[in-house]
Image (cartoon, rainbow, N blue to C red):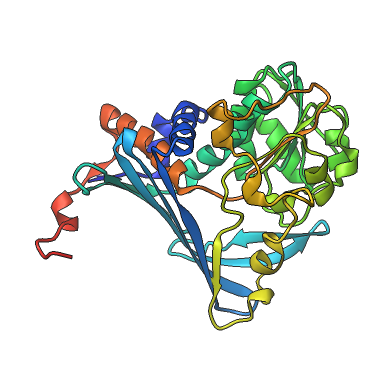
Amino acid sequence: MLILSNEDIEKILPVGASLDVLEEAYRDLGNGKAATVPRYDVFSPTKPNEFYEYKTMSGVLPNRGIAALRLNSSVVKWYEKAGAVRKDKLPVAGGDRYVGLVMLFSTETGEPLAIFPDGYVQKLRVAGASAIAARYLARKDAKVMALLGAGWQASAHLITLTMVRELKQVKVFSPTAQSRRHFVEEWRGKIPADLVEAGSAGEAINGADMVICTTNSISALFPGEILQPGMHVSCVKPCELDATTYHRADPLIIHWHEAKPFQIAIGVDPQSIPDIAEGWSHPLTREDTAVWDLPTISQLVNGQHPGRTKEDAISCFCNNVGLGLQFAAVGSEVLARAREARVGREIPTDWFLESVHP
């Protein structure tokens, strides 16, 4: 069994290198040849205004011979910033760190194959979904992108979106001026497009062809009225966009038919937890359409949905729920490259096997 670190994976799997395997996984999912298991979140109170969160999701990708389990064991809190409610994990594990793990299993023998932190692959799989959707939905001549957010997810989105469209300019907005300035300085010259700061979300969106949301906000980032015909919009969770944006979108594509994760609260009123009370109750659909009736990214890549059909349409990809299958897909690429490069630490697989019939 192979043990890998985030640093190991970053060395062998560049951002954007997993787009093909993710698209393959979406295709298999839509054709009934792969499976994704619903996400479960369990919350229990710890210190005042802080909660323990246990989160799991999993998926099986038979064509790659891989099953994956992703879990987070975290302490989280919510706070207000720039007029919006945001959620952060707290680094309270040993050495001021976080706990997020991915385990890979063989679908041929059932044996565990690898275990590694989820951080680096997390941003790859989320940015990959946004980029694949943009490949099918954004105008072919899209040149300007508004990037809302300057954190962990933003950098991966910046790279992957420039891989699917020949962007000339990226306008970056984050409510913290120092954060967006640092982001622009760090990434300027590393991608073909010119990076510039924007002083507001509206300023970033004005004149953009694509609007890409990459924040930890559970409040809408901008009013949908300001979107112009021909734009493509995407989010990393549905609450970043408002009802007007969803109502104006045509087409509106979702990630998968699970409208939200299964959420359990222990020893506390569920309505006291923003993720439950607000974060996933945001309107996702037109008034007359249920979320499970909307087309998915699998239908896009399978050709079962035409994608953008009008140049002046406002297209939207709503990443309404994370998929465990993404970790099986990206994980299969991680494992193959790690074995080829002889990266990581091998430990005896026997440690994880048993002679007792479970």
Q: Is residue 272 above or below residue 90?
A: below
At x 29% / y 40%, what residue is drawn?
344
Q: Furthest residue to the right?
A: 225
Task: Give me the residue at 62% from left, 35% from top.
Answer: 130
207 or 117, which lies in front?
Answer: 207
Query: What residue lies at 64% left-to-right and 25% top-to-bottom?
Result: 136
- Residue 230 is left or right of residue 213, and the answer is right
Report the front residue among 261 and 204.
Answer: 261
**How many labels, in total?**
0
Give the percent coordinates (x, y) of residue 53: 52, 67
Q: Is residue 200 visible?
A: no
Q: Is residue 99 left or right of 317 when viewed as pictured?
A: left
Spot occupied by residue 284 in the image (x, y as percentages of width and height): 72, 51
Counting from the top left corner in percent of width and height, residue 224 is at: 85, 44
Looking at this view, name the residue that lies furthest to the left: 355
58 shown above or below 89:
above
Picture quarter containing residue 190?
top right
| Residue 312 visible in image | yes
Residue at 38% x, 39% y: name it: 331
Whether 249 is drawn above or below 223: the answer is above
The one nearer the camera, 60 or 336, is: 60
Quadrant (top left/top right/bottom left/bottom right) for the C terminus:
bottom left
The x, y position of residue 338, in whole percent, is 31, 33
